[in-house]
Image (cartoon, rainbow, N blue to C red):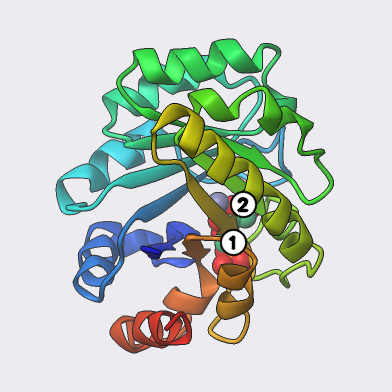
Amino acid sequence: MKYRIAPSLLSADFARLGEEVRNVIAAGADFIHFDVMDNHYVPNLTVGPLVCQAIRPHATVPIDVHLMVQPVDALVSEFAKAGATYISFHPEASRHVDRTIALIRDCGCKPGLALNPATPLEYLDWALDKIDLALLMSVNPGFGGQAFIPHTLDKLKLVRTRVDAAQQRTGREILLEVDGGVKADNIAAAARAGADTFVAGSAVFSGGDYGKTIGALRAALT
Ligand code: DX5
Ligand code: ZN
């Protein structure tokens, strides 16, 4: 199993974002996780395509855009132009989930579907054959630094089975990403439950030495 660590810029120093991106990549980040919040779908407001475009030259790894916005579609092409690699969205925020997935693909990006802690898995059953990333939220979206919700582990196991089946059917790689409250002391449990891609915001950016923290996360996975 190839594991990926995706530091979330939500906990980075926004006054020095380019430098933060370079430092965290030098420290071993596989993806840059870019959280977009609109104060409508979630009760917080962060950054948009202009900031994604600004960090793009600093990001030598894929940018994993996580849209927590409603509506979704108008922002998809903006983030594609701004250099997003993956674009994930929440099914509750799109009127036409299948259409949004197709739109992300048509814009040249890799589509992901993000499920909240209480969102049923049925959404995935009708999307897995077309997406490249399943994102399971292990906190309610909107804020960094929240505690990991334990029932995510049971959900991850169910999604792992579905993802494996879809990968066999389609021959395409589908990442299973867990997002929220991931730390060195719970990342192994998330991996055992089936996650292969791990978002870590506060764990990485509040830890001081990024190399040490990412190293500790990776060490817990071996
Ligand atoms: C929450 C965001 C997460 C969050 C992760 O709405 O989607 O990506 O920033 O931060 P931590 O790791 O601090 O929970
Ligand atoms: Zn996120």
- Ligand 1: image quarter: bottom right
Q: Is residue 130 left or right of residue 115?
A: left
In percent of the image, x 71 and y 41: which residue is there?
42
Is the residue under label 1 in contact with that under label 2 (CB below 8 Å)?
Answer: yes
Q: Amino acid at mark 2?
A: Arg
Secondary structure type for disc 1: loop
Instruction: Classify 159 as above or below 212.
Output: above
Res 37 seen here: no
Q: Is residue 178 above or below residue 191?
A: above
Name the one closer to the observer, 124 or 112. Answer: 124
SS type, badge 2: helix
Q: Position of residue 130 (x, y in %)?
A: 50, 23
Residue found at x 73% / y 29%: 123
Quarter of the image for residue 151 reads bottom right
Residue behind mark 1: 194
The x, y position of residue 105, in whole percent, is 39, 19
Query: Which residue in the protein does label 2 denote?
Result: 160
Taking the spot 46% from the left edge, 80% from the top edge, the residue there is 221
- Of residues 163 and 151, which is closer to you in this image? 163
Mark 2 or mark 1: name the one nearer the start of the chain.
Answer: 2
Taking the spot 49% from the left edge, 40% from the top edge, the residue there is 133
Q: Is residue 151 left or right of residue 67?
A: right
